[in-house]
Amino acid sequence: MLLVVCGLLSLAVVALYLSPVLRSYTFTLLFPLFYRMYTSRLGFAVHSYFLKESKRNENFKKQKQIGALTETNPIFALPFLSDNYCYVVLYANRNSETCAIIFDAGDPEVVLHFLANNPNVTLTHVFSTHKHWDHSAGNEKLAKGSALVSVIGSSVDKVSACTKQVTPKGMFATWSNL
């Protein structure tokens, strides 16, 4: 199957260089096919393979604070793959416990590593901006970790493992009501 995907990609690249007309038709015809494949279980398998390969590099353990919403709401970037990040925003709930909201959990292992290094933090929400695996592959595993974790994603995009689907505007309303 991987050979078929590579073959189709090669044809697309050749067609892109041949002419503007072919370029237009190639994009129009092949983009939906590649998008469907990327968001399918085949795409998940390819994403999982690249995650496994990237674990050989210890860089994925290098989390860093990149800012803060307020003094009590630090934001952390958790790197995975070669150029992807999922983001963690910490907040205090009504009981003054430190909780975490994860944005785009493409790799559940980096999130679990973060939580293991911060045992006083409780994961409460996972927001997925869209269904690409580099944004949503960790949803299922993180949701299984606790019944209290709410996985929130777009109802337009049908994000995997959602416990609550919202419209794009609803994403902001949900965020503001935490």
Image: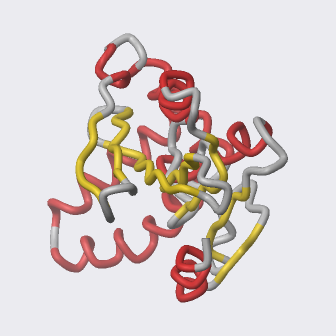
Left or right: where does residue 129 sit relative to residue 144? left
Q: Looking at the image, which residue is at 60% across and 44% down?
A: 137
Q: Nearer the viewer, residue 177 or 111?
A: 177
Residue 68 lies, with reference to residue 111, above or below; the image says below
Q: Residue furthest right?
A: 147
Q: Tag count in the figure?
A: 0
Asked where in the image residue 157 lies, by quadrant, the reply is bottom right
Residue 118 x/y as whole percent: 50, 28
Asked where in the image residue 158 lies, by quadrant, the reply is bottom right
Q: Looking at the image, which residue is at 59% across and 53% down?
A: 96
Q: Nearer the viewer, residue 7 or 129?
A: 129
Q: Is residue 38 visible in this depiction of the protein?
A: no
Q: Looking at the image, which residue is at 68% across and 44% down?
A: 41
Q: Quadrant of the N terminus?
A: top right
Residue 18 lies, with reference to residue 106, above or below; the image says below
Q: Nearer the viewer, residue 88 or 79?
A: 88
In this picture the colour scheme is secondary structure
Q: Residue furthest top?
A: 56
Residue 18 lies, with reference to residue 88, above or below; the image says below
Q: Quadrant of the C terminus?
A: bottom right
Residue 25 x/y as whole percent: 35, 76
Q: Residue furthest bottom?
A: 169
Left or right: where does residue 54 sit relative to residue 13? right
Q: Is residue 51 visible in this depiction of the protein?
A: yes
Residue 121 x/y as whole percent: 57, 38
Asked where in the image residue 39 lies, by quadrant, the reply is bottom right
Q: Looking at the image, which residue is at 17% across and 76% down?
A: 20
Left or right: where does residue 15 sit relative to residue 52? left
Q: Nearer the viewer, residue 175 or 98?
A: 98
Residue 42 x/y as whole percent: 63, 41
